[in-house]
Image (cartoon, helix red, strand yellow):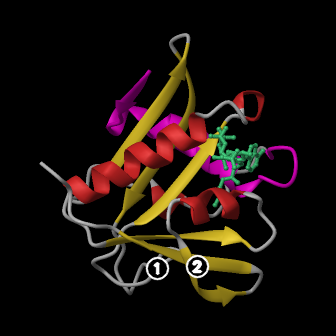
Amino acid sequence: MIRSGGARDVPFLRDMLRHAFYWRTPVGDEEPPLTRYVNGWGRPGDRSLIVFDEFVPVGAAWYRLFTQQDAGFGFIDEQTPELAIAVVPSRRGRGYGHELLGGLLDCARKDGFRAISLSVAKDNPARHLYESYGFEQVREDDGAVVMRAPLSAATP
Ligand SMILES: CC(C)(COP(=O)(O)OP(=O)(O)OC[C@H]1O[C@@H](n2cnc3c(N)ncnc32)[C@H](O)[C@@H]1OP(=O)(O)O)[C@@H](O)C(=O)NCCC(=O)NCCS
C-alpha cells in the first residue's frame, strides 16, 4: 500500500533521512545535517509518499522546493524540487523503491513541475535506479553527483 504523506509523517521522514545519509554504514544515532529536507513540512510544493508492508511504514520518497539562500545539496533552481528517498534496510530489493520513485515522479508531473533533482553519492548503487527514470548528471560536488530528470506534462 502506498499513500500520500503529511505533517504527521515527519518523524518517519526523519528516520528515512538517516537511512539515506547512512546508506553506506549502519545507521547512526545522530540526526544527519539534513533537517532542511523536512523542517516546517507543508510548504507549497512539498509532497511525500509513504509505502507500507503489512501496515508498517517501510519507505518514503518526497520532494520540496528550496531557495538559493537555503539550498539543498541537489539544488538546481527555485522552480525545481529536490527528491529524497529511502527504504528500510530489511525491505530493500523488493520493488518498494520503484513504487515510490515512479509514484512520486507522477505526483511531480501532476503538480506541474518541469524537472526534478537529487544529490547522490558517486558510488551509491541507487544511481542506477535514478538513471532508469531519466535522471542525468548535471554536476559533481565533493564525491556527490547532482542529477536532474525532465518531466513531461501529465496526461489527464
Ligand atoms: C535506493 C533505495 C531507495 C531503493 O529501494 P529498493 O526498495 O531497494 O529498490 P527496488 O527493490 O525497487 O529496486 C530498485 C533497483 O535498485 C536496486 N537495488 C536493490 N537493492 C539495492 C540497494 N540496497 N541499494 C541500491 N539499489 C538497490 C535493484 O537492483 C533495482 O534495480 P533493477 O530495477 O535494475 O532491478 C534503497 O535501496 C535505499 O533506501 N537505499 C539506501 C538509502 C539511499 O541510498 N537512498 C538514496 C540516497 S540519494
Q: Is residue 73 visible?
A: no
Quadrant assignment, res 145: bottom right
**Residue at point 77%, 28% (across, down):** 90
Nearer the observer: mark 1 or 2; the answer is 2
Screen quadrant of the N terminus: top left
Of the numbered discs 1 and 2, the one sitting upstream in the chain is 1
Distance CA(mark 1)–CA(mark 2): 8 Å
Report if the beta carbon of the residue with label 2 is closer than 8 angstroms to ligand 1: no
**Residue at point 62%, 45% (across, down):** 86
| Observer-nearest of 88 and 13 | 88
Q: Which mark is residue 75?
A: 1
Give yes or no for contact between labels 1 and 2 (Cβ–Cβ under 8 Å).
Answer: yes
Note whether 72 is above or below 88 in the view shown: below
Horizontal and vertical percent position of residue 71: 45, 79
**Label 1's element?**
loop
- The stretch of residues the image draws in magenta is 1-28
**Residue at point 34%, 74% (across, down):** 80
**Label 2's element?**
strand
Say which residue label 2 marks: 146
